[in-house]
Image (tube, rainbow, N blue to C red):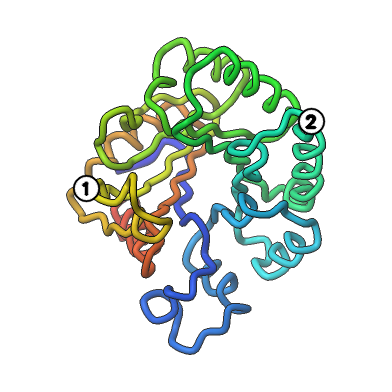
Amino acid sequence: MTPKCDILIGTSGYSYRDWVGPIYPEGTPQSEYLRLYTQMFPTVELNFSFYRQPEPAMLERMLQTSQGKLGFAVKAFREMTHEVSPDRFQAVADQFRHGIRPLEQAGKLEAVLLQFPYSFHYTRDNREYLARLTDRLAGLPLAVEFRNSEWFHRRVFDGLRKFNLSLVSVDEPRLPKLPPPVEEVTAPLAYVRMHGRNAEKWWDGDNQSRYDYLYNDDELHEWLGRLAAMAEKASRMLVFFNNHWRGQAAQNAKRLMEMINPS
């Protein structure tokens, strides 16, 4: 595969203790995780920001540790996508913008990920909320992930394209009402998230068991054609593996890098 645009591959998060042994050397302290990660991948998707608002000082330290070698995608805080309060909406969004400013100023902000839950249905109220949120975050590189297949039709794709919002293409279990993998590109930045295909645990598992999955080479090879098609329409592409349990995400990310750029 000879990509037509830059394809940056990484993982969703990097600070997992169960990666010590499979990915990081035995005995590695948590303070060394990011430095070691930076030696393997060019980009990372930060997930901690979903659980707590990012703080400028923390992101400045991460920039220093990565020495300008790493790009960052940042997952939006949960009060922006999952636990929305109309009274707090603007303040929460503004605080988030302030927190990620060091990445923006350093030119290392690859994207802001707006990942909505399955319960975020294709309704007028939700469409209006999405418009208000993206307007509040205007100027940032925004990528939108829907977990409900109701959103996957031409009208939504055209709307995202109109406002320069990246549609996140996902790989996840082939279950009813979950989004299918698509090659649709709605902005110069293409964005892909690989969640694994653990259908048995998808609905009743936790954040470990749900993403406990290791892609085999045939499953990764399925994506080479999709990525090539998307690369024809994008100027830059991010691919993140979220099957993080026991370092499986890092294993698959390395393997996909080898497939795209064989030595």
Mark 2 residue element: loop
Q: Is residue 149 left or right of residue 78?
A: left
* Marks 2 & 1, CB-CB < 8 Å contact: no
Label 1 secondary element = helix
Query: Which amino acid does the dot numbered 2 rest on?
Result: Asp
**Which numbered disc, 2 or 1, marks the residue that appears first in the sequence?**
2
Q: What residue appears at the point 58 percent right and 40 percent down from the top-left corner?
A: 113
- The image position of residue 74, as x and y in percent, is 62, 48
Report which residue position mark 2 lands on. 87
Q: Which mark is residue 246?
A: none
Left or right of 192 on screen, residue 29: right
State the residue at coordinates (73%, 59%).
Answer: 59
Label 2, label 1: how far apart the Cα atoms are? 44 Å
Q: Quadrant of the N terminus?
A: top left
**Mark 2: few/some/many CA within 10 Å (<14, 14-19, 20+):** few
Residue 253 % position (x, y): 38, 57
* Label 1 crowd bin: few (<14), some (14–19), many (20+), radius 10 Å: few
Q: Which residue is mark 1?
A: 219
Q: Amino acid at mark 1?
A: Glu
Q: Quadrant of residue 185?
A: top left
Whole-percent x and y of residue 234? 48, 30
Question: Which quadrant does the C terminus fall into?
Answer: bottom left
Which percent across, then down, holds residue 118? 44, 33
Q: Identify the residue at image location x=54%, y=32%.
A: 144
Relative height, residue 17 to residue 152 (above, below): below
Is label 2 or label 1 in front?
A: 2
